Image (cartoon, rainbow, N blue to C red):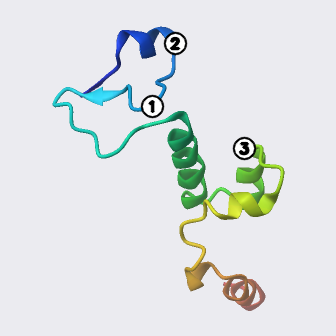
Amino acid sequence: MWSATARSAASGCSGRGEAHREDGQIPRPISPHSLRHAAIANAVDAGVPLRDAHILAGHADPRTTGHYDRARGNLDRHGVHLLTAYVAGV
C-alpha cells in the first residue's frame, strides 16, 4: 500500500522520494520526472505512435521522444518489416 506524506499530499506532488510504501522500502527515489518518463515510455510500449507520444511529451525535438522507445532495437517493429507486411497484405 502506498501513502504520501502530509507535505506531498498538500502540494499534490512529491519532491523526491516523498511517496513511500508502508514498509518504507522503495527501490529508488520517485520524482515528477521519473513519473513523466514512465508515462511516456509506457504509452510508447502500448503502441502509441511516436508522433503522438512526442506531442504528449511536448518535446521540442522528436528525436528526444525516440529515447523513450524501450523496444527500438526490436526488429519486429522495424520499418522494413512493417512495410513488407503492408505490401504483402498481411
Other residues around mark 1 within 10 Å, as few (<14) / some (14–19) / many (≥20): some
Q: Decide if residue 60 is on the left or right side of residue 75.
A: right
* Left or right, residue 46 beside residue 23: right
- Look at discs 3 and 2 and give the one toward the viewer: 2
Task: Name which residue type carries label 2.
Answer: Ser
Query: Is the residue 20 above or below the residue 50 in the image?
Result: above
Residue at 37% across, 9% down: 6
| Residue name at image x 56 percent, y 40 percent | 33
Q: CA distance from mark 1 to mark 3?
A: 23 Å
Q: Does residue 33 sit above or below 61 in this rendering?
A: above
SS for dot 3: helix
Q: Which mark is residue 41?
A: none
Query: Secondary structure beneath disc 2?
Result: helix
Disc 1: which residue: 16
Label disc, if present, on residue 56 of the rendered structure: 3
Label 2: few (<14), some (14–19) or many (≥20) C-alpha neighbours in 10 Å = few
* Callout 2–callout 1 Cβ contact below 8 Å: no
Q: Position of residue 45 (x, y in %)?
A: 54, 60
Question: From mark 2 to mark 1, how far is it between C-alphas?
Answer: 13 Å
Labels in figure, total: 3
Q: Is 81 placed left or right of 37 in the picture?
A: right
Which percent across, then down, holds residue 29? 39, 39
**Considering only vertical position in the picture, is 44 above or below 21?**
below
* CB atoms of marks 1 and 3 within 8 Å: no
Q: What type is the residue that disc 3 sits on?
A: Leu
Whole-Å distance between the Cαs marked 3 and 2?
Answer: 24 Å
Residue ID for mark 2: 11
User: Crowding at label 3, few (<14), some or many (≥20) Cα neighbours within 10 Å?
Assistant: few
The amino acid marked with disc number 1 is: Arg
Is 58 in front, or is 81? Answer: 58
Give the quarter of the figure containing the C terminus: bottom right
